[in-house]
Amino acid sequence: MVGQPPAPAGGGLRGTPGRMPNVVRYGTVRSASGVRGNGTTKGQLNGSSATPQVRSDGDQTTDRDQAAGDGPARAAEWGARIGEAVEFARRQMAGGTEVDQFGFDPEFNSHVLMPVARALYQHWFRVRMKGLAHVPGEGAALVVANHSGVLPLDAVMLQSGLHDEHPAHRNLRLLGADLVYELPVLSQLARKGGHTRAGPGGAHQLLRSGELVGVFPEGFRGIGKPFSERYKLQRFGRGGFAVSAIRARVPVIPCAIVGAEEIFPMVGNAKPLARLLGLPYFPITPLFPWLGLLGAVPLPSQWIIEFCPPVSTDGYPAGAQEDPAVIAEVTAAVRGTIQRKLDELLVERGPAFG
């Protein structure tokens, strides 16, 4: 098909016969002699029209043949996808998928949860993940990260990045707060996605099984802090993560997450409403609750997640997990590493919404 010039404002051009062709609609040219043809003037104002570029019948036939050949291939591809989806749904309904003692369903996680997280990771937050070489390809390790953002989307982004970008595509087994497991639908999805209720027993069991475990020692103090305290680490509890790592003799991998603080800038906390609803806090942001559900859409900040060099724990003597001085030492080392890395990443990232 020949490309057509846009229609001039105010309608067609009327020229003087023998000088400028009369352009009627959609590139049709009327010459001084009254002969009509489809073409473009290409800026020629002397009445001559450019020769239209028409593809040969051979080219058109080739395109038709190629399109006809692509049809069955595409149909077969979509047929295979639909077949896989139907088979997956059948296994889920029949309870035929493998689930571990904590309820983790790797197939459900990869086919249902991770595609949703991936859309946010790649297209909404545009996450950059760094330092993956510090995360082992196999065996147990404990990832310790800062926590922020009102809703735990930082946990989901951390899990998504390791699942998709790590060479071994590792599943991060996250330790979650009790509140998550008190909500019927959310608790079921969390378990299927590899999350486990936070506690020394579950953490030790996962680590002894060779899993990659993730924890956020700040808890609700981090995720529910005001925007004015963004990227300032809160207290790391009583060092429970250090106890678990030393007991299992696994490395601790400090992890800094920049970007989550800006998704819901928390400028206030409606404490009476939070107590009424049984929540640790009720966030007030510039958009929520004023805009209703629209105000609950996270802002598209730019994220960087970086893993730092591991902190070894296998050099401590047996029973060191009972020594408060050792626990304080490991906790301070990990916390200090994360805070320094946060400060560096903030400078590297620049504006949150650039």
Image (spheres, grey):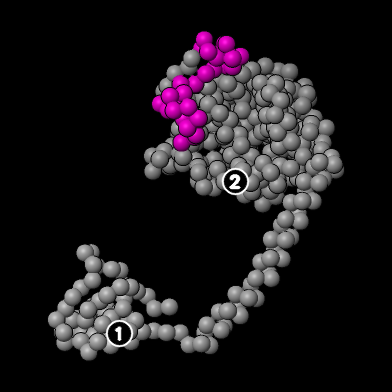
| Residue at mark 2 | 118
State the CA–CA distance, disc 2 to disc 1.
Answer: 55 Å
Q: Nearer the viewer, mark 2 or mark 1?
A: 1
Q: Position of residue 156 (x, y in %)?
A: 61, 37
Return the residue nearer the eye: 212 or 62: 62
Residue at the bottom extreme, as displayed: 33
Residue at x 54%, y 35% (from the top left corner): 256
Quarter of the image where one finds residue 106: top right
- Disc 2 marks a residue whose amino acid type is Arg
The residue under the point 66% across, 52% down is 167
Q: Look at 65% across and 29% down and name the residue there.
A: 215
**Quadrant of the rendering where the C terminus is positioned:** top left
Q: Is residue 295 visible?
A: yes
Picture disc at residue 44 = none
Asked whether residue 136 appears in the rendered view, the answer is no
The answer to whether residue 58 is left or right of residue 45 is: right
| Quarter occupied by residue 249 | top right
**In the rendering, which numbered label is found on residue 36?**
1
Left/right placement of residue 318 relative to residue 77 reads: right
| Residues rendered magenta in the picture | 271-299
Residue kind at label 1, given as amino acid type: Arg
Q: Is residue 65 above or below residue 213?
A: below
Q: Position of residue 119 (x, y in %)?
A: 57, 46
Residue 78 is a magenta residue: no
Reading the chain from its start, which is encountered first: label 2 or label 1? 1
- Look at 77% across and 48% down and name the residue there: 88
Where's residue 56, x and y in %?
48, 87
